[in-house]
Image (cartoon, grey):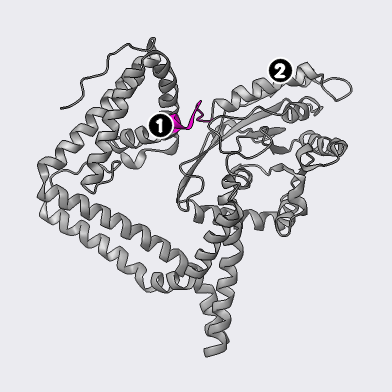
Amino acid sequence: MVRSTLQAFFTWVLELFFRRIEIAGLEHIPPHGPVLFVINHPNALIDPLLVLCYAPRPVSFLAKEPLFRMPVIGWFVRAMDAIPVFRTQDAADMTKNRATFKRAREILERDGAIAIAPEGASHSESRLRPFKTGAARIALGAGTAAPVAIIPVGLDYSDKMKFRSSVLVYFGEPLLVDPGMLPADGEPAGTTAADLTRAIEDRLASVVVQADEHEALHLARRIDRVIAADASDAKAWRLDDSWAVRRRVVEGHRALKQHDAALLERFVRRLDRLERAFQLAGLDPSGRARPKPRARHLAGAIGWLIFRILIFIPLALPGLLIHLPAYWMVDRTAHYLTRDHPDARATVKVIGAALFYPMTWLLIGWLVGRSVGLEWGLLAALTAPFAGFAAIKLAERSDRFLTATRALGFHLFEPEHYQRLHRERAQLRSDLLDLARRLAQEPPPTSTAPAEPA
């Protein structure tokens, strides 16, 4: 009961923090039998929360032992059936990991599911870190009747520290560990564990966008915005489509940088110039091109946008005033506590929000109840969360309205410039997709970039 309540609560918290959460690859998770999830680890406690909340089976996570001794967090990890891992960097007694491995294997032998981050620690590097052998040793020593399904989980954040960003949780194809591989004493040989660890690393790398340097990842996100903008159906453009584009860009970046740096540089210059032109025009580089507007359609679209904004105002404005102190406190606290560990910033924000916002609702209820009566105080406390949500939606809708208004004004008063920008973007998108197809089919080209527009 406690676990299911906490899971529902943290699912709500995650869906409040992220504007968009997409889950892909659920068909790869067997409904029964032992499962070992292995995840990349870029975002501290947010990573395990996403798996715990969105995997279709109950999961016990292997977590570093110091978390179990922290106030509040220690209670949470115990309530979620986490298993402590003792690490040398924590000056822990490593012999206690025998009990850790035993408990993990017992869960697998009961056809349960566990999860582990084989990199060993959260980080902000552009590539996966070298893996520890713990996941392989647990799988090889499980002693289960059925094969252990090792499922890679790629966690892909659009901006891992930003409130109302997006995240893709990608469950990859399982790697099956045959029970026949298990040694009689339950402790695998070093070479066997090392081989399986390399196989796990390869499998996890297949669901993670990684690069030799951050430059390639940044370029991949910029190009993804250009390609997604003119997709035939923008609403159907999913985060896993974006993930696939960025993987192709990263792979192409590596090949071009090695074999034809001049071609790569020409594409980057075109992208730079296009982004600057959109910025000077006050347009979003990822916005869709608009057809020539008709007066009645235009009036209807503006009226509908204004109507939806007006609906949120009565709740949103009080919600903004009520939650602003807590929002400021959470943001400042997160920046202060994570100055040396920015990859933990989102975790601190989520934990802070889970503490400060309910305290705000209770305080508002107490103040109103003391002033005008218990019934009104209870109503205020129950209404405050909806007011906060309305404030978020109002801010997002207002931002979209202003963006759309700028684009429409530019479209109406400078139609030729507007259409030229979108034609240039469409041409760049076409050239990029053509280059990606050629890179996938043949060796890297040599100086074959289309001529840059004058």
For the residue carrying disc 2, how many other residues have a C-alpha within 10 Å: few (<14), some (14-19), or many (20+)? few
User: Callout 1, which amino acid?
Assistant: Ala
Residue 163 or residue 282, whichever sits in front = 282
Q: Give the position of the N terminus as an image quadrant.
A: bottom right
Q: Which residue is mark 1?
A: 220
Residue 288: within the magenta?
A: no
Task: Name which quarter of the figure residue 133 lies in.
Answer: top right
Residue 276 appears in the rendering? yes
Query: Residue 129's mark?
Result: none
**Residue depicted at 63% across the width and 53% down the height:** 7
User: Callout 2, which amino acid?
Assistant: Asp
Q: Is residue 55 above or below residue 427?
A: below
Task: Name which quarter of the figure residue 220 lies in.
Answer: top left
Image coords of residue 365 (percent x, y): 56, 79
Q: Give the position of the C terminus as an image quadrant.
A: top left
Image coords of residue 143 (percent x, y): 82, 27
Magenta span covers which residues?
Answer: 208-217
Give the overall secondary structure of the magenta segment. Answer: loop
Q: Which residue is mark 2?
A: 195
